[in-house]
Image: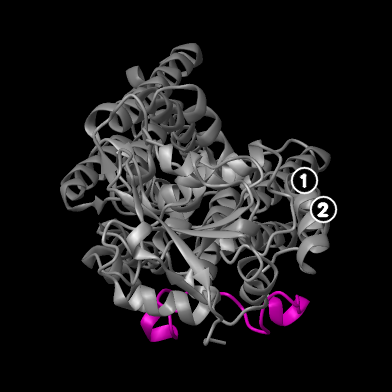
C-alpha cells in the first residue's frame, strides 16, 4: 500500500534513540498509572462533588435497582424510553455505589473510565509513522491521552452514573485492534484481530444503542482495509464479530423486549417493528443533530460556543474548532509536499493504520452528527481527538517532541474554556439519605407514579413496599399505547394512586393540567406529604382517577 506524505519526521538525538525497550515499557506503565490517579483525583477531590444528575435521580439508580431485584423483565407499560434499554451501561456504577461510599465509588468509576485514556495512548502509538523512534511513540501516545483527558464530556462524566465513558471502552479497544491489525504478520492473524474488534464493537452497541454509528464506522474502516488488500476477509471478519458481540451483550435483552413489546429495540424504530404499545413514529429528540450539510459545518463552532444545540446542560469545548483548523493546515502542508515531489518512502502498516483511524473517526462523527448531535454520545470521537491532534500537528511540525509540546500547550490553553457540568452536590456519607417514612406508609396495593416533568424522582421508588406498582412518567409518551394501558389497566382500577411531585408543587399549574389530560389524575393537595432526602424536598400526594382528556 502506497504511503501518504509523512505525518511525522522524527529526528531525535542518538542518545534518545538508545533508550531500552524495557525502560520505555516502564515509562508507559508509569504514565498509565498517572492518568488513572489523575482521573480519580478529579472525580473525588477536584470536581463539584457527587453526581446527582437528572438522569441519575430519574432512572439510572432506579432502573438498575429494578434489574438487581429481578423486576426489570416484567411486562410493565412504563411510559419512559429508558425503561426498555439494556441496563448494562449503568450496572458498573450502580454496583460500586451500592457497596461503597459516594466518594469511593466515584473514584472507582473514574478509574474505570480512565481506561479510555490508556487505550488512546496505545492507539496513537500504533498509528504514528514507522520512522518515529520508540521514544517518540511513547511521548506522543502519552500526549494524546492527556489531550483526550481535557475533553469536556469525558472530564464531566468522570465518576458519574452516565454510561457513555463506560461503553466507549470496548469501542476504543475495537479501534486499537483495528489499527494493530495492519501490522499483522499473517493474513490469518489480521482476520482474528478484526473479528475481535467487531465483537468488542458489537458488545459496545449492545450495552448502549447510541454506539451503533461507531459500529458502522468500524465496518467501513474494515472495508477500506479489504479494498486496499483486495481481500473480502477483513470486512467479513469484522461484520461476523460485530454480530457475535451484539448477540452476547444484548441478545438476551432483545428477546425479552420482543416478547414484552413486540419490538427488540422498543420504542425506537417503531415505523419498522409496529409495536402496539407505541405510535408509528420514531423516537428522536429533534432539538439536537444537524439539519442539513450547512448546519453540520457549523458544529465545531457550536461546540466551542457552548450552545444547547449540543447538550441540554452547560457545555463548551473549543478543541473541535482548533482541530478543524489544524486538519486544514495539515492538508495544505501535505498537498504542498506532494506538489514539490516530497513523497516519502513506504511507511508499512502504519499508513494503513492511519487510514483506518481516519475513516473510523470521520464516519463515526458524521453518523453521530446526523443521527444524534448530542455531545455525550460523541465521547468516543472526543477521546480520539487526542490522537487526531498529534497526527495533525505532526504533519506540520515533523518533530515528535515539538509536536507533543505544542499539543499539550494548546490543550492546557483551552482547558479553562472547556465547560461541562451536570448537577453535583458536596460529598456526603449517603448519596440520597432518604427519610422514607411517608413512602413506607403507602399501601402495597397502590400505584405510585414519579412525575419527571415536575422533578426527577425515580430514586425514591425503591423505598416503597414490595408489590407496589411503580412507574416513572414522562410527558413524551402522551398519546401512546403505553399510556392508554397504564390508565385503563392500573390507574383506573387501583385502590390507591399516589404521585411523587417536585419541590415546586403545588405551584405548577401546567404540570397539573398535563397530569389530568394525560394520566386522568387529579391531585389531593391537602393530603400531600413532604419526602426529605439529600436533594430538594419531594411531595408524595394521593390522587384520584377522573379520566383523561388527552389523546
Task: Give x and y (percent) for residue 488.
Answer: 67, 74
Q: Is residue 283 magenta?
A: yes
Q: Quadrant of residue 102?
A: top left
Q: Quadrant of residue 511?
A: bottom left
Task: Give x and y (percent) for residue 51.
Answer: 35, 40
**Residue that badge 2 annotates:** 240
Q: Is residue 137 left or right of residue 347?
A: left
Tell me: residue 445, above or below residue 97. below
In the image, the segment drawn in magenta is 270-296
Q: Quadrant of the N terminus?
A: bottom right
Residue toward you, 234 or 54:
54
Q: Residue at x 77, y 76 (%)?
A: 273
Q: Secondary structure at mark 2?
A: helix
Q: Residue at x 55, y 74 (%)?
A: 477
Mark 2 surroundings within 10 Å by alpha-carbon count, few (fewer than 14), some (14 through 19), many (20 or more) = some
Q: Is residue 461 left or right of residue 452?
A: right
**Residue that badge 1 annotates:** 195
Q: Kindly indicate whether the residue at mark 2 contacts the one at mark 1 (C-beta within 8 angstroms).
A: yes
Amino acid at each position: 500500500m502506497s504511503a501518504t506524505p509523512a505525518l511525522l519526521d522524527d529526528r531525535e538525538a542518538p542518545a534518545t534513540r538508545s533508550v531500552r525497550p524495557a525502560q520505555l515499557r516502564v515509562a508507559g506503565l508509569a504514565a498509565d498509572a498517572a492518568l488513572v490517579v489523575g482521573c480519580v483525583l478529579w472525580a473525588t477531590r477536584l470536581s463539584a462533588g457527587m453526581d446527582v444528575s437528572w438522569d441519575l435521580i430519574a432512572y439510572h439508580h432506579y432502573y438498575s435497582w429494578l434489574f438487581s431485584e429481578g423486576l426489570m423483565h416484567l411486562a410493565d407499560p412504563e411510559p419512559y424510553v429508558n425503561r426498555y434499554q439494556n441496563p448494562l451501561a449503568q450496572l458498573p456504577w450502580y454496583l460500586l455505589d451500592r457497596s461503597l461510599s459516594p466518594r469511593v465509588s466515584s473514584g472507582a468509576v473514574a478509574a474505570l473510565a480512565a481506561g479510555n485514556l490508556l487505550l488512546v495512548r496505545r492507539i496513537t502509538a500504533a498509528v504514528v509513522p514507522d520512522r518515529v523512534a520508540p521514544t517518540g511513540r511513547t511521548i506522543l501516545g502519552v500526549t494524546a491521552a492527556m489531550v483526550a483527558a481535557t475533553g469536556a464530556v469525558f472530564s464531566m462524566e468522570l465518576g458519574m452514573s452516565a454510561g457513555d465513558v463506560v461503553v466507549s471502552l470496548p469501542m476504543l479497544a475495537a479501534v486499537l485492534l483495528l489499527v494493530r491489525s495492519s501490522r499483522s504478520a499473517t493474513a490469518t492473524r489480521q482476520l482474528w484481530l478484526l473479528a475481535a474488534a467487531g465483537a468488542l464493537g458489537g458488545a459496545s452497541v449492545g450495552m448502549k444503542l447510541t454506539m451503533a454509528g461507531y459500529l458502522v464506522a468500524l465496518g467501513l474502516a474494515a472495508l477500506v482495509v479489504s479494498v486496499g488488500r483486495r481481500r473480502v476477509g477483513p470486512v467479513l471478519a469484522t461484520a461476523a464479530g460485530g454480530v457475535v458481540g451484539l448477540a452476547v451483550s444484548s441478545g438476551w435483552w432483545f428477546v425479552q423486549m420482543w416478547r414484552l413489546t413486540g419490538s427488540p429495540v422498543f420504542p425506537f424504530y417503531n415505523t419498522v417493528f409496529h409495536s402496539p404499545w407505541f405510535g408509528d413514529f420514531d423516537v428522536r429528540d429533534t432539538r439536537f443533530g444537524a439539519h442539513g450539510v450547512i448546519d453540520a459545518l457549523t458544529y465545531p463552532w457550536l461546540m466551542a460556543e457552548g450552545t444547547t444545540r449540543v447538550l441540554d446542560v452547560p457545555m463548551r469545548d473549543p478543541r473541535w474548532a482548533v482541530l478543524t483548523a489544524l486538519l486544514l493546515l495539515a492538508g495544505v502542508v501535505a498537498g504542498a509536499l506532494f506538489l514539490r515531489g516530497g513523497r516519502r518512502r513506504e511507511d508499512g502498516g502504519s499508513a494503513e493504520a492511519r487510514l483506518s483511524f481516519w475513516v473510523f473517526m470521520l464516519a463515526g462523527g458524521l453518523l453521530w452528527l446526523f443521527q444524534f448531535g448530542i455531545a455525550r454520545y460523541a465521547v468516543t470521537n472526543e477521546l480520539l481527538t487526542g490522537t487526531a491532534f498529534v497526527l495533525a500537528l505532526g504533519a506540520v511540525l515533523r518533530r515528535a517532541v515539538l509536536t507533543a509540546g505544542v499539543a499539550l500547550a494548546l490543550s492546557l490553553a483551552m482547558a479553562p474554556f472547556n465547560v461541562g457540568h451536570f448537577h453535583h452536590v458536596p460529598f456526603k456519607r449517603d448519596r440520597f439519605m432518604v427519610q422514607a417514612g411517608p413512602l413506607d406508609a403507602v399501601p402495597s396495593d397502590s400505584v405510585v407514579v414519579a412525575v419527571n416533568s415536575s422533578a426527577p424522582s425515580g430514586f425514591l421508588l425503591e423505598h416503597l413496599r414490595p408489590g407496589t406498582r411503580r412507574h416513572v412518567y414522562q410527558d413524551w409518551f402522551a398519546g401512546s399505547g403505553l399510556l392508554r394501558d397504564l390508565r385503563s389497566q392500573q390507574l383506573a382500577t387501583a385502590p390507591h394512586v399516589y404521585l411523587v411531585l417536585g419541590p415546586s408543587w403545588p405551584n405548577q399549574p401546567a404540570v397539573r393540567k398535563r397530569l389530568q389530560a394525560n394520566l386522568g389524575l387529579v391531585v389531593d393537595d391537602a393530603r400531600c406529604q413532604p419526602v426529605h432526602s439529600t436533594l430538594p424536598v419531594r411531595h408524595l400526594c394521593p390522587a384520584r382517577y377522573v379520566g383523561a382528556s388527552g389523546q
